[in-house]
Image (cartoon, helix red, strand yellow):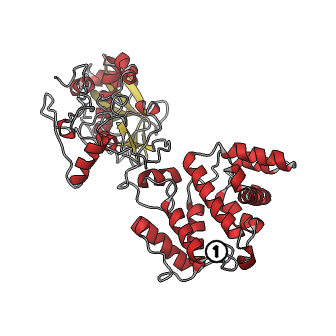
Amino acid sequence: MRIGDVTFFRSLAIIDAEEYQPPIWKSYLYQLQQEAPRPKRIICPGEVENRPKYYGREFHGIISREQADELLGGVEGAYILRESQRQPGCYTLALRFGNQTLNYRLFYDGKHFVGEKRFESIHDLVTDGLITLYIETKASEYISKMTTNPIYEHIGYATLLREKVSRRLSRSKNESRKTSVTNEEHTTVEKISSLVRRAALTHNDNHFNYEKTHNFKVHTFRGPHWCEYCANFMWGLIAQGVRCSDCGLNVHKQCSKHVPNDCQPDLKRIKKVYCCDLTTLVKAHNTQRPMVVDICIREIEARGLKSEGLYRVSGFTEHIEDVKMAFDRDGEKADISANIYPDINIITGALKLYFRDLPIPVITYDTYPKFIEAAKISNADERLEAVHDVLMLLPPAHYETLRYLMIHLKKVTMNEKDNFMNAENLGIVFGPTLMRSPEDSTLTTLHDMRYQKLIVQILIENEDVLF
């Protein structure tokens, strides 16, 4: 089977994991990149006055388009830099491609660029430009159809081998098991890719299958790289595609729009517990709720429910930061027992800090205005119904975390005689902790505080009805 064959993937659904054959990547776009014209710098024979220090001998000073065209001499890939006759101080890249001279406004801010991509040198900028122009000229129709038959749909997370491959990979977690395909220039590529590692995740009865979008960010790949959605080569010198920061999925930017919301975060990529997106954390740890919430609540219920002013009284800030660092460093193995932190207010402070540090609050920015509107309804029954309707809009991990917390806070109110904390008091504490306005406005925050308090109070008092 050749790399470029239409049948590019041998099914993962085979009897034994050891028989697994990785995807066969499509090489057509790689071959085109190899054929792209190479940059040919046309050097100015004399010294040019006022040449910017960040340009080299390819700078020809103030010349016209016609002069630039003549200097390029009809050579594919030839390029020069010039200063505009009409706008002194503005610079242009003149590039020969497709039997015509193309002129691009050139910028510099520490790096060279004509569009979004920024390059260390003009040579790299021209190289990338020629590759992009050549591939988009030769394969525009092919590129437009790349996403119609993706390998992602065939392997993704549907493979029957997840459990077996997972066991095999875990036995050699420090050694990536690699096989290779060799192209015309004997380029070796890693075939057990991040996609295969993600496909190895075990989906058993204990897996909490919350939907999660991928956290794609533009990425520069070193060496040949293939898209794990469509199996096509990612062309160019830099910023060839995007990578999910949470699971490592590598895809074309255009393919990222078609990838399902099935990100499976890799614990090796999740550096912190605090300040980490809630859904990302629970997916990475394969738990219903953030483990910091479970651990803190268990500790509070074991020894603190009767503590006066529970959640209202603050613990020492430096000790709360110690707990935070312990969770970030040790995860679920963090020791927050009475032997280490005898003051229960340190644990309540650490739990509140976790909620405050979330990049997206438990009550999300999307649902925030709907909760505020529900709180403004005067009729109690209608208000309760409206709150319930908005709860249904929360992402599953956020909903489950909020439900678990409200059950806990209800237990706190049941010990009101000792701790003096009723639902209204807890609403004052947890209102701004669990929900924040998407508008960064002090006036809005002050105006909404009573409604934030009321929402939390309603959730506590009616947790058995609402959840």
Q: Give SS at disc 1.
A: loop
Q: Note whether 360 is above or below 156 in the view shown.
A: below
As rendered, which of 107 and 189 lies closer to the eye? 189
Identity of the residue drawn at 37% across and 45% down: 52
Relative to 314, say whether 210 is above or below: above
For the residue pair 446 and 117, the one nearer the viewer reads as 446
Total number of numbered labels? Answer: 1
In the rendered view, would you say 43 is above or below 326? above
Residue shown at 20%/33% (left/top)?
Answer: 21
Q: Residues within 10 Å of mark 1 (few under 14, many from 20)?
A: many
Q: x, y percentage for residue 98?
A: 31, 17
- On the image, the x and y values in percent for residue 345 come to 60, 77
Q: Residue furthest right?
A: 378
Apparent side of residue 346 relative to residue 166 in the rendered image (left or right): right
Residue 180, given in percent of the width and then of the height, sits at 16, 37
**Residue at (26% x, 43% y) in the render:** 165
The reply, left or right, for residue 403 in relation to residue 169 is right
Q: Is residue 214 visible?
A: yes
Amino acid under label 1?
Answer: Leu
Residue in view at x 68 percent, y 69 percent: 412
- The percent position of residue 234, horizontal first and vertical second, equals 31, 32
Q: Which residue is mark 1?
A: 305
Quadrant including the N terminus: top left
